[in-house]
Image (tube, grey):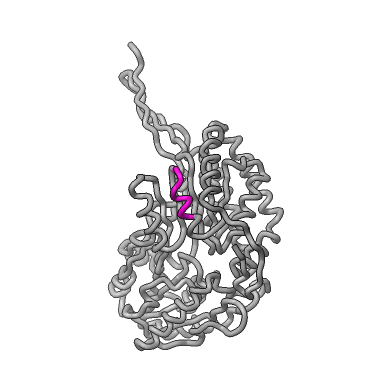
Amino acid sequence: MKILNPANGELLAEVATDDAASVAAKAAAARAAQPAWAAVPMVERLAPLQRFRAAVVRELDTLAALLTREVGKPIAQAKNELNGLLPRLDFFFEQAEAAVRDEHVFNGGGMHEEITHVPLGVVANISAWNYPWFVGCNVIVPALLTGNAVLYKPSECATLTGQAITRLLHAAGVPQEVMQCLAGGGEVGAALLAQKIDGLFFTGSHATGQRIAQALAGRLVKVQLELGGKDPTYVRADADPKAAAESLADGAMYNTGQSCCSVERIYVHEAVHDEFVRHLLATVATFKGGDPMDPGTYIGAITRTPQLEVLEEQVLDAVAKGATLHGGGTRLPGAGNHFPPTVLTNVDHRMAVMREESFGPVIGIQKVKGDDEAVALMNDTRYGLTAGVYTQDEAAARAILSRVNAGTVYWNCCDRVSPRLPWSGVGDSGIGLTLGVAGIQTFTRPKAWHLRSPG
């Protein structure tokens, strides 16, 4: 498999891929090794993962450069991802033992009831390319901490980074059989699904997630799917239009818009609409595109070449139906997958840009008359990952967000993930969750104990 730099087409590496036989062998090795790993005390499982964290710190610059070359993420943002991983790891380290501690829930009349948390067993993780360190470690680290073996298939667009994660874990002391990395595309993923696994954790597109769910439905394997979003935000009449515009421009364009929680549609009260648009356009104009290895670059490369056509088609569809295009709108000439920041106004829900995931630096802005219209439009979607509102009134924000169907909601902020809070979705944004204490427990199953004393 050839690994190409999406920013310039440069060949980075050629990687030997797995096949059905090697996937089966790795799965069998993981199955054989998992019981012994589960028997290791938590404190001893924790130690190599703490050494893994130290290795990430030690190699951060090199790892960030690899990430940038492989997925086109601007180097400053690649370093942000790695630095942001550290408190996420710390949360898992601090909370894991308590999250899966035995629970003694009743003792009386000679009967004792308790709950233990048993590892699922062998966990398969088909991961994403846009935040490979975040998304991969959301599964790998709590799964290992709770005693599971992991079969990890990074996206084919982030294979080298996935192999780096695995290398550091092995060097830190996680047994090779317990943490297995698979290389390849969809055929390797299909081979993984054919194995005897106890849980499947996937992050990616709705279409692929649906195929995975169908493939595993007959076997009743635990499936978690972290899928896409069409994340809306509403700017109320009382919001500061400049502050909201600066925040939402970043929320829409950070990571070149390639985040499941990127702001993908904005509804602005008519009272502040024009001023908001003016400030957002001024902010976007400051976003420097170009070489992702340049520390000053904010807009990097589109990782997957086919997405360029998706973005162009959304823009053409919107303009044909009456939208106003404010610059950009088509791929840039020359080598690499480059698409400039693109803002559309006078949009509505007849347009694909307001209904289908863009996953690029494209944002539509629609004028609304009030809260009820905004909420109705925010909920007019098959997705439900994140949603937000900008307003001076916390009570109004809470009232609005309580009516919006989304797993995560924001007041006066956006495009934010906390390790302390569960990450989940509604509708086509997926099933299950990661992060938070529940995101540690999800790699275990509760076992109920009924213990009656003799006599």
In the displayed structure, does residue 37 sit left or right of residue 412? right
Name, please, the residue furthest toward the front: 21
Residue 103 location (% of width, % of height):
42, 32
Q: Is 136 within the magenta?
A: no
Residue 190, compared with residue 100, is above or below; it is below
Q: How many marks?
A: 0
As displayed, is residue 96 above or below residue 246? above
Q: Does the magenta run of residues contain 193?
A: yes
Of the pair 437 and 294, the residue shown nearer to us:
294
> Which residues fall within the magenta stretch?
189-197
Specify the quadrant of the image occupied by residue 79.
Answer: bottom right
For the N terminus, the image quarter is bottom right
Horizontal and vertical percent position of residue 373: 29, 75
State the image quarter where residue 107 is shown. Answer: top left
Comparing 193 with 74, the one in front is 193
Look at 67% across and 71% down and name the residue there. 293
Query: Residue 383, can we see it?
Result: yes
- Residue at 70% of width from left, 60% of height from top? 62
Residue 369, how many percent across, how many down?
31, 80
Q: Judge left or right: residue 35 versus residue 431.
A: right
Residue drawn where x is 40% and y is 55% of the image: 212
Question: In this image, 76 relative to 19: left or right?
Answer: right
